[in-house]
Image (spheres, rainbow, N blue to C red):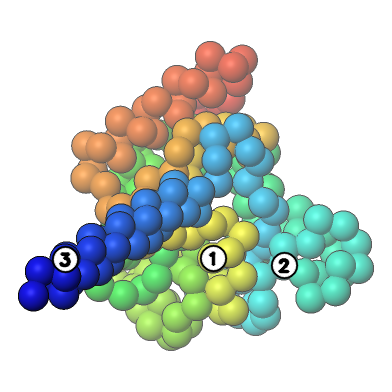
């Protein structure tokens, strides 16, 4: 009688040990997967603006004739209907939100819209990962967003930017280097304001002056 009971407890302990290993592994992977690491440069991309007429997949090419990534380097893709991250970080510090148009996730866009008026030196932008374009257009218009909102119809940026949660908000210095760890959950307006203020101060500490407008 005692041996079966011992075997049962031993099996339970073994199961618990496996669960602990699995959880530890998942948490470790989560730390790696959550956004671009500070000090790394934002991967280049150009996507159609939600309210524009341009159709097509995200261009993520870093050199000419790069197959499915694009024939022209993403940083060289310009136009009235294009959201180009390279152009954004050439102009100043960047706050970039990657989101899906579901649930409470898009709420960050309204927060960014509010802060864009307080921080005119910072470039705010957002990209919807997949989703339906007509629905995204309704979202942009209903919230009266003036910040550029692009659409990544194939979800290419999800892996390129290591998107692990919704929304994911990246903060980059002028020039495109990630300033601090990405926000991986919906922030409060006060919390987001603090991060944007920190980004602006850190950018100036690195010698960036920008415009006073």
Q: Is residue 63 visible?
A: yes
The residue at the point 61 percent across, 15 percent down is: 207
Disc 1 or 2, which lies upstream in sequence? 2
Give the labeled residue for mark 2. Answer: 59
Name the quadrant containing residue 4: bottom left
Q: Which mark is residue 6?
A: 3
Give the labeled residue for mark 1. Answer: 158
Select label 3 or label 2 by which is in front: 3
Q: Look at the image and tell me in which quarter the N terminus lies.
A: bottom left
Mark 2, Cα crowd under 10 Å, few <14 / some 14-19 / many 20+, is many
Query: Could you tell me if the residues under marks 3 and 2 are in contact, i.e. CB atoms within 8 Å?
Result: no
68 sits left or right of 136 in the view: right
Query: Could you tell me if the residues under marks 1 and 3 are in contact, i.e. CB atoms within 8 Å?
Result: no
The residue at the point 77 percent across, 69 percent down is: 69
Under tag 1, what secondary structure?
helix
Residue sitting nearer the eye, 9 or 181:
9
Mark 1 to mark 3 CA distance (whole Å): 48 Å
Mark 3 to mark 2 CA distance (whole Å): 60 Å
Q: Residue furthest left?
A: 1
The residue at the point 58 percent across, 25 percent down is: 210
Mark 1, Cα crowd under 10 Å, few <14 / some 14-19 / many 20+, is some
Query: Could you tell me if the residues under marks 1 and 2 are in contact, i.e. CB atoms within 8 Å?
Result: no
Name the quadrant containing residue 138: bottom left
Residue 87 on image: x %, y %:
67, 47
Disc 3 or 2, which lies upstream in sequence? 3
From the viewer's perspective, is residue 158 above or below residue 122? below
162 sits left or right of 103 in the view: right
97 sits left or right of 2 in the view: right
Q: Residue furthest right?
A: 65
Residue sitting nearer the eye, 52 or 192:
192
Residue 136 on image: x %, y %:
41, 77
């Amino acid at each position: 009688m005692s041996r079966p009971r011992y075997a049962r407890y031993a099996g339970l302990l073994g199961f618990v040990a496996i669960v602990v290993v699995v959880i530890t592994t998942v948490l470790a992977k989560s730390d790696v997967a959550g956004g671009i690491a500070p000090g790394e440069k934002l991967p280049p991309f150009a996507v159609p603006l939600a309210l524009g007429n341009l159709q097509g997949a995200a261009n993520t090419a870093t050199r000419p004739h790069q197959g499915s990534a694009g024939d022209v380097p993403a940083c060289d893709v310009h136009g009235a209907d294009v959201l180009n991250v390279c152009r954004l970080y050439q102009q100043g510090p960047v706050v970039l939100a990657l989101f899906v148009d579901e649930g409470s996730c898009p709420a960050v866009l309204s927060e960014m819209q509010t802060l864009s008026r307080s921080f005119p030196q910072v470039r705010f932008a957002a990209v919807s990962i997949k989703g339906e374009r007509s629905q995204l257009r309704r979202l942009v218009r209903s919230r009266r967003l003036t910040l550029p909102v692009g659409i990544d119809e194939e979800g290419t940026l999800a892996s390129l930017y290591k998107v692990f949660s919704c929304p994911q908000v990246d903060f980059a210095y002028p020039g495109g280097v990630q300033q601090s760890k990405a926000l991986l959950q919906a922030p409060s307006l006060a919390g987001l304001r603090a991060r944007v203020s920190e980004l602006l101060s850190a950018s100036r500490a690195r010698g960036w002056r920008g415009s006073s407008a």
